[in-house]
Amino acid sequence: MTTTQTSPAPARARLSEWWQRRWVRIAAVVLVALIALGAPLNLTQYAVYQVTMMAAFAVAVLGLNIIMGYGGQVSLGQAAFLGLGAYVSAYGVTHGWNIVLVFVAACLVPAVVGWLIALAAARLRGLAIAMVTITLPIVGIPLARRFDEVTGGSGGLTVSFMQAPEWTGLATDQWRYYVVLAVTVAFFLLARNFLRGRMGRALAIVRDNESVALAMGVSPYRYKVLAFTVSALYGGCAGFLYLVGVQYVSPETLSFATSINILAAMVIGGSASILGSLLGGVYYVLVPFVAGQVNPSRAAMYSGIILLVILFVLPGGLTSLPRALRRLRRRRDDGPGTRSTAAAGPADDGGTQAEASSQTERQQR
Amino acid sequence: MERFVQLAVDGLATGSIYALLALAIVLVHRATGLINFAQGSMAVFSTYVAFAFVQSGLPVWLAIVCAVVGSFVFGAFVERVVIRRFEGGSHDVAVVVTVGLFVLLAGLSGTIWSYNHREFPSLFPLESVSVGGAHVGLRNLGTIVVTILVMGLLQLLFLKTKLGLALRAVSGAPTSAALSGIPVGRMLMIGWGLAAALGAVGGALVAPKLFLTPSMLDFVLVYALAAAILGGLDSPVGAVVAAWFIGVAENLAGGYIPFIGDDLKIAVPMALMFLILVIRPQGLFGRKQVVRV
Amino acid sequence: MRQHAVRILAIAGAATLALSACGRDSGGGGGDGDGGEVEASPGITDEEITFGITTPLSGPTAGPGTCTVAGVTAYMERRNEEGGIEFGDGQTRTVQIRSYDDAYDPSRAVSNFRQMINDGVFGDILSLGTPTNLAVMPLANEQEVPQVFLTTGASQFSEDPEANPYTMGLVPTYKGEGEAFGALLAEAGEPITVAVLAQNDDFGEDYVEGLEAGIDGSDVEIVARATYEPADTSIDAQVTDLADSDADVFFNANSQHNLAVQSLLQAQQLGWTPRVFLPSNTSSVSDVLEPGSADAFPGVYTTQSAKDPNDPEFADDEEVVQFQEDMEQYASNITTTFVPHCAWSYAAGAALEDAFTRMEQPTRESFMEAVRSIEDLDAPMLLDGVTINTTEPGVPPISDVEVTEFNGEKYEITDGY
């Protein structure tokens, strides 16, 4: 990124040069880790709870990203896997299972369900998978009500678990935060390895062009099944974390509206992005809070407005902010004569320009 | 036998409610390649506008006509101002934009007209007729008939008119369409406008039965989506047949299979849909997708 | 390189020092101090007391939800304008109400409740919904925060004050209403067949349980049952099945106005005209009976505890006139249409005022003591003869239900089946 201009450039060049240095990146990670670890000791109970829930939903959004953002399939049933994970956890906790067993079950049961569904559905064309996933919350809610000895029926299940052990000296909400943080970090790291490795690359090929994938010996079917199973597993884990925070589960947890909100959070945070999933989790929890502060009676309307404003300004999601800023600066630098080909301005004649630019955006990632 | 016919006819009526919204979804998808999650909210908002006209003294039919015309303009406006920006890009983003629109419009309706149920007058009287031993309300019958009419009109539009051809061209091959001189932007606006107008008709038709409230079509939307997808997402006939199928299958399952009962009856059409899609992935009436490598 | 490691450590050290400098303050003062001055609970000062309501303000249940806020706001704002309420400890305070939208989602209700505590409210009142309040209940009792006058007829909130001392319902339980009607049928002393349509959740289940308790041991028999989901578009199929039984009574445990109307119309169309029972939430003359052409049925019953301002009988009733005025003046930005929850919320305002006047200390414990000792309060907007009484454990504050019958124009106390 060399430039022949002298005065405005050096400051900016210096900043991005700094970022290239390894020790700066490590310091940043250490700083973030310290903040994450020190936070519950300095924040109010409510703030700690909010951050805990952000982490739980970030895992759910990451799961959705794996099948949708990276895998290119549409899934509208993530809430069903979250709910299933929460119900399994609640069942295990009320029956006195070892907490590790509860966690494993909460992850595996939805994963198995997801795997079975994917086995049948992965052969279907894009939107048929969407339809299959729509049915999950639709059928899940009456099922949860029907099997009330296991699920508590309409009244749901109240649990009380994950109290802070004596030896830590922590308050319960702080302890829960650390547990959720640990699980979230672990799952995010796992996903990062999975997605940056061979699996991730195979998924990307399958997403972009299935016939090419086949020709290269990568089985689209197998990778779609894999992605869907992993996505369901993450959903189940998120369900466990959800239960840690909320300590209650009911059929409402499985609703279609929750699935849609998780989808919106994923897009707002940034599709096919690990950081984007984290931001999605933050968005999911923060927006009702912010909208409620403006006006509680009109909170729903304001959350719709916030969503639209964010996407208008950043169609690539929040993670595209640095990219968008860079583009803005470049346009200012280049002066009025040049037209940046990466601009995604509204075109009067349909979306051809936007189409081209979005393709280059994808490759840039 | 009587019971069977009654359940089936009631199922057709319920299915027609899903079908009207499914047709609007199909129209938008056919014209712009997007799934509009805000279709239900837009229809409800249009119906509230009609309600406002009725309250100010207009006769019902006139109020509905005004609302339909207004909705066409509104739909075109939404496409140009809100959706246009996202059309060439990622579908996921466009879908979430429609979700935002959904929430915004529902909240707006609630703010202006409150969340309580409002009674909306029907075009049809409250009587019923006997059809094969079953009692069918005239209002239900009216809904079924209008559904068939609209389905026919849409099918005609796409297959036999120049406008329909232009709409299909714009969504299928935008660059070629633009190069052939078709005003792409205007076509997109017309597509959304028509869908919104259709939604207004549907909303006004079902509001007497469902009662007007901002979330009136929230659950209908889910079934309408399922029906549209099952029908192949591009076929008006497919969407209507699929919607009727959902309505009838769920009623018959609930009525005749004791294990399923009323609460799980929705699972039956869903499970059957799944099977159908496995056997025929392009949906009942969809076209097989051919992708250029 | 060692240089870099040193730099990283330096930054880390500085950050740790900075973070450890602030500690978090332990939760605000609450509970009694020993001897002398009693420390006030959060949310109450010498000038004002603040309550929070977490309730659906958007979505399908937002109609009743907004009313739970509107009624008490109207009541309290008028008192505030007149200078406030004199509490039992001698201070005159104004009452602030804060509302939070939970869209009937239990996880948002929990979040709102925690936010309320963080925002420093004194207590949670009038929240609507069963799963939402169930999710909050353990938290409220653990934190010793009042969770009272909840707008839900589920029995869990009032039935065990030992286990949940800080929680209390408000409105008659669904079971209680069902039982009242069942008892009415049983008293008739003749064999009666009943077809039951119940919402598939705690609302419907409780109504049916109550009905069954009421008819236990009599000649009344349930011959057909059907359920539906609150989200259902149409219940014509269920009504068709029930009509097949040709039962004498149609027990309709329905909380959805549109579906209630549908069921009435469908029954008529099928030629089935039994006597009908509707729950108190869903029996309004203007919203349900008229659109449903209820005069086609030989008898429509419901249970009532609140006055309906749209009922011409109460057009000159003092309380109703005052209620309409207050709602117009102070709550018209919240809602302009009426459902019974507005009346219950308004009546709860009076109950709160009564508790305040007997509250001797500015603490939550003192408040709960006062709340649990309301005796036969004749609250405005409740039917004559219906009072608020919290001294009986295990029943909600409003527990009298009158079974009333529609006489073509309005409801009146029934003579019997």
Image: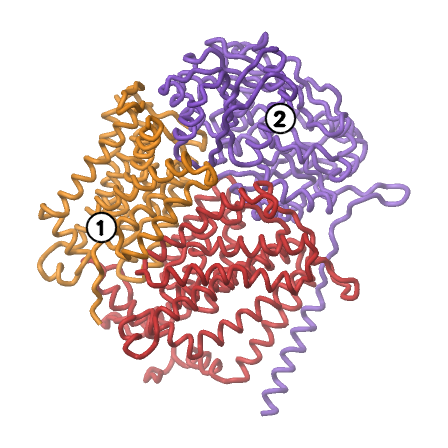
Given the current orientation, which residue lies at the most extreme front position? B1
- Mark 2, Cα crowd under 10 Å, few <14 / some 14-19 / many 20+, is many
Q: The chain shown in purple is which? A: C
Q: Is residue B40 visible?
A: yes
Say if A252 sits above or below B170 in the image. above
- Left or right of B185? Residue C189 is right
Q: Residue at x 45, y 63 (%)?
A: A115
Which residue occupies the foreground of this view, B6 or C15?
B6
**Mark 2 belongs to which amino acid?**
Gly
The shade of chain B is: orange
Quarter of the picture holding the C terminus of chain C: top right
Q: Residue at x 26, y 56 (%)?
A: B282
Circle 1 is placed at which residue position?
Answer: B285
Say if A85 sits above or below C173 in the image. below
Say if A86 sits above or below A221 in the image. above
Q: Position of residue B145 (x, y in %)?
A: 22, 31
- Left or right of A62? Residue B47 is left
- Left or right of C30? Residue C118 is left
Q: Is residue C328 visible?
A: no
Circle 2 is placed at which residue position?
Answer: C210
